[in-house]
Amino acid sequence: MPVTGEFEPLEDLDAAADEYTRACAGADDPTQQRLRAEFVGVALPFARRLARRYRGRGEPAEDLEQVARLGLVKSVNRYDPERGSFTAYAIVTITGEIKRHFRNHGWGVHVPRRLQDLSLEVGQTRAALTAELSRRATDEEVAARLNIAVSDVREAEISGAAYSPGSLNAEADGYHGAEVGDLLGSDDPGLDLVDDRTSVERLICRLPERERRILALRFYGNRSQADIARELGVSQMHVSRLLARALTWLRQAMLSDNPPVWAGTDETDHRLTLATAYRGDVISTRVTGEVDRDNARYLRDELMAAVRDGARMRSLRVDLSGVPLLDAAGIGVLVAVHEAARVRGIEMRVTGLQAYVCRIVTASGLQDLVEP
């Protein structure tokens, strides 16, 4: 049939497609563009009817019709008469564009493509089974019909709720003037403690290693004072005094803009005594008491004096069997004295280490100083 200008509205799009194809054969580009526009205009009612099938699913009718028109244009551009009916091809293309639009724009929350398709299949299958059984189909029945796991059915239904999630700003039923978001959640009681926790952590770092360890064992390790005393090799009463002194300082520091200076420990609780003896070419020094930063300087001076005075000696033995606690300052003393003894040709050995002190010395890499 010859083309004389505009296409007349036709119900049979296949016939119109054949006429369009014959008219475009051998025509120049401007003529093909005009014929293409006329053919699209003829098929617009068909695209509009397809779009109407998807009304009432949360998307504006105008948007759906616009998407259907886009699908129609794509089907006209890609149509190959040798592959069959134009109507069938246009239906597949247009509905595909509409479904893609729902996947990309219809979901209120992003859901993987697999769950989107599965949610649609589960909904359609459940509706069909409900009509057949005259009751709501169970998850097991839907899973059996689709040949999938029951867990997949439940996951698809949960994902389906993301298609049109409720708004937190919607008015709550039964609560005049209140929004749904007002009824969810509550104030975190720990929020006000964030500043205090940060301050306490910073102040704890200013305490000596011994006090930090006791606090960690007591409040983070949930250890009793007796357990801590056994681990440190001191009395339970001693641990109680150290713990009370540290907590008192922390309270004062938390209530003050300028934290007080850590006063350390009293000499009564932590006095350090040394007994040095010279036997032949061996210097023997027995240390008694806890070695920390408060008295490490005293220990260093005494041991250095023994090394200087025993220039003709060949061996220095430091007996730490009476030392229940040795911190980083004490380790520094051992390193310094060992170096001074080495320069003078004196062999230094440490003996009688208690369990906790032995772990500290070994962890510091000084195991070569320990006499087996």
Image: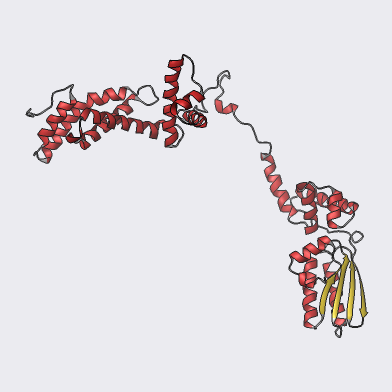
Residue 326 in view (yes/no):
no
Task: Give the percent coordinates (x, y) of residue 60.
Answer: 36, 25
Horizontally, is 132 left or right of 75 in the view?
right
Of 275 and 53, the residue lying toward us = 53
Position above or below: 23 against 284: above
> Does 79 sit above or below residue 307?
above
Outermost residue, bottom direction? 312
Task: Give the position of the N terminus as an image quadrant.
Answer: top left
* Residue 44 percent coordinates (x, y): 22, 26
Do we see residue 125 in this rendering? yes
x 78%, y 55%: residue:
213
Q: Residue at x 78, y 74 (%)?
A: 336
Q: In front here: 91 or 61?
A: 91
Q: Quadrant of residue 184?
A: top right
Q: Position of residue 370 (x, y in %)?
A: 81, 70
Between residue 340 and residue 185, name the one nearer to us. 340
Q: Residue at x 41, y 32 (%)?
A: 117
| Quadrant position of the C terminus in the picture | bottom right
